[in-house]
Image (cartoon, grey):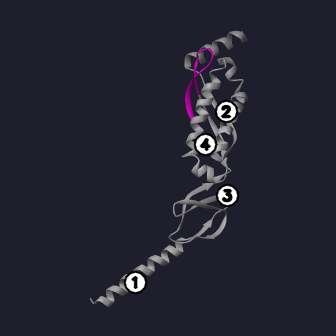
Amino acid sequence: MDINSISQTILSLLGLYVLLQFARSIRLVPNMQAFMVERLGRYHTTLGPGFHVLFPFVDKVVFKQDLKEKATTVDPQECFTRDNVKVLVDGVIYLSVVDPVKASYGITQFEYAAVQLAQTTTRSVIGQIDLDKTFEERETISAKVVAVLSDAAANWGLRVHRYEVKNITPPKSVQDSMEKQMTAERD
């Protein structure tokens, strides 16, 4: 091989690479999504739905945020009521991204953070209520958790739509006692 053929091969590979980078700079953003673009490593702009052309080698999409409402499960956790009865409580948080920049740069893993905050707040609220009232106070528990989550979520670029308590499960011994009490009251 002579030097001319080697240089032509290198130039053609370089041209193919540049062409590929230009093709990658074209972005189609779907509806209800936002792409965060960094220019030379620094936040530059947010791309909304539609067709966009970025500067190759300079601009890079680093975050993609889904703006639709999401249902996130809050795993069962042990909580103690005011009268020291251990119950398992789980729920669902409904949230959506309203500020994609804050959701991308303001916190790492906002869904995980929202679940952790919901769990700790639920423990705190359940701890102020007697066992008999926990089943009646689901709306109060949900409202207090939403209030705490909304305060934090505003800094994270999120909107908390609602929190629903799915299950409040007392220990088996307490369930048996409650059933015996209800049977005695009926008799």
- The residue drawn where x is 62% and y is 14% is 83
Q: Earlier in the sequence, mark 3 or mark 1?
A: 1
Q: Classify the position of the C terminus by image quarter.
A: top right
Q: Work out how far the residue at label 2 is from the one at label 3, CA to CA, in angstroms.
A: 27 Å
* Badge 2 amino acid: Val
Residue picked out by circle 4: 72
Which tag is nearer the camera, tag 3 or tag 1?
1
Which tag is nearer the camera, tag 4 or tag 1?
1
Q: Earlier in the sequence, mark 2 or mark 3?
A: 3
Number of marks: 4
Which tag is nearer the camera, tag 1 or tag 2?
1
- The residue drawn where x is 32% and y is 85% is 6
Q: Earlier in the sequence, mark 4 or mark 1?
A: 1
Residue picked out by circle 1: 11
Q: Earlier in the sequence, mark 3 or mark 4?
A: 3
Q: Earlier in the sequence, mark 2 or mark 4?
A: 4
Q: Which residues are magenta?
A: 72-88
Secondary-structure class at tag 4: strand
Is residue 78 found inside the magenta-colored segment of the image?
yes
**Residue 186's spot in the image, x, y percent?**
72, 12
Numbered mark located on residue 145 in the image: 2
- The residue drawn where x is 62% and y is 50% is 102
Q: Are marks 2 and 3 in contact (CB under 8 Å)?
A: no
**Residue 77's spot in the image, x, y percent?**
55, 29
Residue picked out by circle 3: 32
Is residue 39 found inside the magenta-colored segment of the image?
no
- The residue drawn where x is 65% and y is 47% is 157
Query: Is 87 or 175 nearer to us in this picture?
Result: 87
